Image (cartoon, helix red, strand yellow):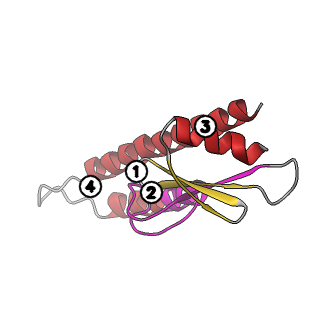
Amino acid sequence: MEKDKILNFLNKYNYNYSEKNNSIFVKLELAQQVKIEFDEPNKIIIKDKLIGWNFLTGTIEMTLKNALIYNFIGTIILGILCMYSENKENGLNFIALFLVSITWIILFSVFYIVKLESFKNQIINWTK
């Protein structure tokens, strides 16, 4: 019954989705995919994944949580490299590059998190 409600919701709002066995795969914007599983009775499991080319991980497929950890570690490494390779003689400003990369990561992290959480809330509210 829950699966039918969710399929009605996805059809009503024109989401791009596919079904396999007891799972629904929904494609959201900018290479974000949500998997809704109905394997357990009276329980819906919602998982996310960044697929294809995306703004946080490039071509590496991983969950949003792992992408945030991946970018956090990458930012620390980039920050250390930028601090030690600062060279004013060549006119290169690596701190500016570091700040641009942090801004990029924060903007797209917030975008993907908001998109995922709002989709989850819509699914939860629709099934009530």
SS under mark 3: helix
SS under mark 4: helix
Q: Name the residue under label 1.
A: 30
CA gap, disc 2 and disc 1:
22 Å
CA gap, disc 4 and disc 2:
13 Å
C-beta proximity under 8 Å, tags 3 and 4: no
Left/right of residue 44 with respect to residue 120 in the rendered view: right
Q: Give the residue drawn at x 70%, y 66%.
A: 21
Q: Give the residue drawn at x 58%, y 34%.
A: 118
Q: Which amino acid lies under the numbered mark 4 shown in the image of this protein?
A: Phe
Q: Give the residue drawn at x 26%, y 47%.
A: 96
CA gap, disc 1 and disc 3:
21 Å
Choose between 85 and 102: the one closer to the eye.
Answer: 102
Choose between 30 and 26: the one closer to the eye.
Answer: 26
Badge 1 crowding class, 10 Å Cα cut-off, few under 14, some 14 to 19, many 20 or more, is some
C-beta proximity under 8 Å, tags 2 and 1: no
Q: Which amino acid lies under the numbered mark 3 shown in the image of this protein?
A: Phe
Residue 94: mark in rendering = 4
Choose between 68 and 121: the one closer to the eye.
Answer: 121
The mark lying in front, picked from 4 and 1, is 1
Q: Quadrant of the N terminus?
A: top right
The mark lying in front, picked from 3 and 4, is 3
Q: Name the residue under label 2.
A: 75
The mark lying in front, picked from 1 and 3, is 3
Mark 3 or 4 closer to N-term?
A: 3
